[in-house]
Image: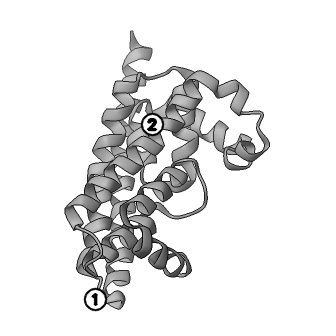
Amino acid sequence: MDVFNALLPLFTEYGYLAVFTMLLICGFGVPVPEDVTLVTGGVIAGLGYADPHTMFAVGMAGVLIGDGLVFTVGRFQGAKVMRWPFFRRVLTPERFELAQRAFEKYGRWVMFVARFLPGLRTPVFFTAGMSHRVGFGTWLLMDGLAALISVPIWVYLGYFGARNWDWMWRMVHNFQYGIFGLLGVVIVVVGVVWWRRRQRERQL
């Protein structure tokens, strides 16, 4: 709520530009929740300061461009950027190692899951670019599919809850739990597929 209260007047004053800029900043791991940013964008649309469908488009552009910049920086300047003090605070060695292990175990699907995990999203996308494990098109497909789930949920939830914040925050928490539950199922399914594939490879 503190972040929401801080963002609301800023977004009301500067509209789409403020939302887009904040989403770019979120892409680089700055600790401002992306879901709260999108919900707040939806709220100002619900209050009449923006169009909800344009806000959805701005939200998609903000998250994909922000994530794409992280992926691109990792691909072309990864080793150099890893030495920057600011970036090392965001992409700690522990997070980088965790992202690498996730790629080894789950492959490209880890990029889909990472969109819903703020603490791992930046390390995963940076690692994807730096390691050259996947191409830009594959990254865009995985991140884009995940964004098509998360972005409209948060923007339109803010839009419809603009006049009833208590209801809106209850629904935000419910959707967060639902998304985490869905991710748990996806992780289990991908893990089973990966384990069976390894078993078949060992039998050859």
Residue 77 or residue 119, whichever sits in front: 77
Residue 162 or residue 170, whichever sits in front: 162
Which residue is found at the position 43% from the left and 39% from the top? 111
Which residue is found at the position 42% from the left and 55% from the top? 20
Residue 132 or residue 77, whichever sits in front: 77
- Corner quadrant of residue 192: top left
Query: Does residue 136 lie above or below 202 as drawn?
Result: below
Query: Does residue 94 lie above or below 176 as drawn?
Result: above
Q: Is residue 127 left or right of residue 18?
A: right
Query: Does residue 99 lie above or below 50 as drawn?
Result: above
Q: Which residue is mark 1?
A: 163
Report the amino acid beneath label 1: Arg
Label 1 and label 2: CA atoms lie apart by 34 Å
Please give the label number shown on residue 68: 2
Rendered-image quadrant of the C terminus: top left
Report the amino acid beneath label 2: Gly
Residue at disc 1, secondary structure: loop
